[in-house]
Image (cartoon, rainbow, N blue to C red):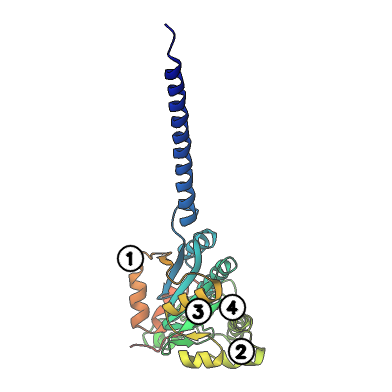
Amino acid sequence: MYPDPASIIDRRRLKRRLNFWRVFAVLAVVAAIAVGFSRFGHDGFRDYVARLDIDGLIVNDPEIDAALEKIAEDDSALALIVIIDSPGGTVVGGEALYHGIRDVAEKKPVVAVMGNTATSAAYMAALGAEHIIAHAGTVTGSIGVILQTADVTGMLDKLGIKPEIVKSGELKAQPNPMEPFQPAARELTKGVVADLHTMFLGLVRERRNMDEARAAALADGRIFSGRQALDAGLIDEIGREKDALAWLSETHGIDADTDIRDAYEPEEDRLWRKMISGTVGKVLFSERLKLDGMISLWHPGLR
């Protein structure tokens, strides 16, 4: 028995309709995926503004370096806000942080926001940003380098203790608390401090568009309030984090309501460093800081 022609026609119509809805369903899925990718970045997250907190003592930190590198390479990170609250730290730490921030700034906008304190190596790091914001009461500046030591030979004499030192040359391990600071070593050490200061001064001149005389006048180690720093040209604006978002919106077209995501969470065992840096003067940092070399640090002693 041959099929009814009307049934054949109906089945063909039904098949065409099924094919249409299959194609429609596939296109709908493709469209949904496209919308998802337009809404989210390449790493699966919505576009965001990265925030990096720099506080406490600044030392050379590979984990922060890695966080900055990740931000630079993440297309979902539209910009970086660096929140700084630090009296400074080692020259190497400040220098590494500066270059890490500059690497990010070559690919996306970076703005620094200063908190209570952003001095010495912390100010060096802030120079890496395109735009620097401080509170009116922020303590900043202290542009300079310091090396601290002590001569305890007089005290050892009174105690009847005589250090015995064997070394390959007279300048080895100078300065050294266990022996007098030799004049030749003092001059050479001054030269190292001066060279590092010249490097710091060069960053100020370049990033703040100052001539040598103007930069040198501001880089004698003095501190500034936020308002004084603005008048001196060391920062760009008095404000806070919301003003950083406003600047990103006005100058780079980034929506002020864009999500902010912390780019780095410090380990809990670093709490001791924050506690120390907030309660004691720079003399007590010597043992920790000498591992990285010269110090670019400001602190008024005990608070």
Q: 197 or 12, which is in the foreground?
A: 12
Element under disc 1: helix
Left or right: 241, with 93 as reference point: left
Q: Does label 4 or label 1 sit earlier along the sequence?
A: 4
Give the residue type that dot 4 points to: Leu
Which quadrant of the figure contains the N terminus?
Answer: top left
Give the residue type that dot 2 points to: Ala
Q: Does label 2 or label 3 sit earlier along the sequence?
A: 3
Q: Does label 1 or label 3 sit earlier along the sequence?
A: 3
| Residue assigned mark 3 | 121
Q: Which mark is residue 171?
A: 4
For discs 4 and 1, the disc positioned in front in the rendered view? 1
Vertical side of 7 occupied by 137: above or below:
below
Q: CA distance from mark 4 to mark 3?
A: 28 Å
Element under disc 4: loop
How crowded is the residue under tag 3: few (<14 C-alpha within 10 Å), some, or many (20+)?
many
Residue depicted at x 58% and y 67%: 103
Residue depicted at x 54% and y 87%: 234
Q: CA distance from mark 1 to mark 3?
A: 23 Å
Give the residue type that dot 1 points to: Glu
Q: Does label 4 or label 3 sit earlier along the sequence?
A: 3
| Residue assigned mark 1 | 268
